[in-house]
Image (cartoon, helix red, strand yellow):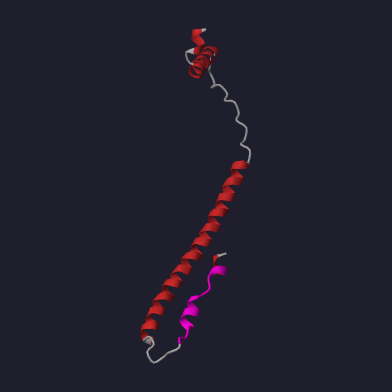
Amino acid sequence: MLSDKIKLTGKDILEKEFKTSMRGYNPDEVDQFLDLIIKDYDVFQQAIEELQQENLRLKKENSSIASRQRQPEPPIRAQQPATGSTNFDILKRLSNLERHVFGDRLHKE
């Protein structure tokens, strides 16, 4: 996990003490810069946590969708002809269906 690879926390940066020397850095400038780093670090950490949560949510959602797709579809029942349909209507529909499926191949033979 990413948090195992991160060596510093915002608290570590905040509590870091630097030795001062005669010609060392201005402690106030260092503190101001470290404050900026801490703020950025906290923003990055929050973004990482949000992305990890979103990643888990999307994995669960994907798993849920995949399991629903694996379930067999209910059998399709043949449509019953409408009441009052005659044999002529049924034959006409069948002829239209054959023409649509097979096209001109039926008439070339």
Find the magenta span and give its range.
Answer: 4-18
In the depicted structure, whether residue 5 falls above or below residue 96: below
The x and y percentages for residue 55 are 53, 57
Residue 70 lies left or right of residue 40; in this view the side is: right
The x and y percentages for residue 18 are 45, 86
Magenta stretch encompasses residue 8 = yes
Furthest residue toward front: 23
In the depicted structure, whether residue 93 falls above or below residue 39: above
The x and y percentages for residue 8 are 51, 75
Furthest residue toward bottom: 22
Residue 34, image quadrant: bottom left
In the depicted structure, whether residue 79 falls above or below residue 105: below
Q: Residue at x 39, y 82 (%)?
A: 30
Residue 31 lies left or right of residue 11; in this view the side is: left
Q: Residue at x 49, y 65 (%)?
A: 48
Q: Which of the pair 91/12 is nearer the observer? A: 12
Count of numbered marks: 0
In the depicted structure, whether residue 97 falls above or below residue 27: above
Q: Residue at x 55, y 52 (%)?
A: 61
Q: Which of the pair 52/38 is nearer the observer? A: 38
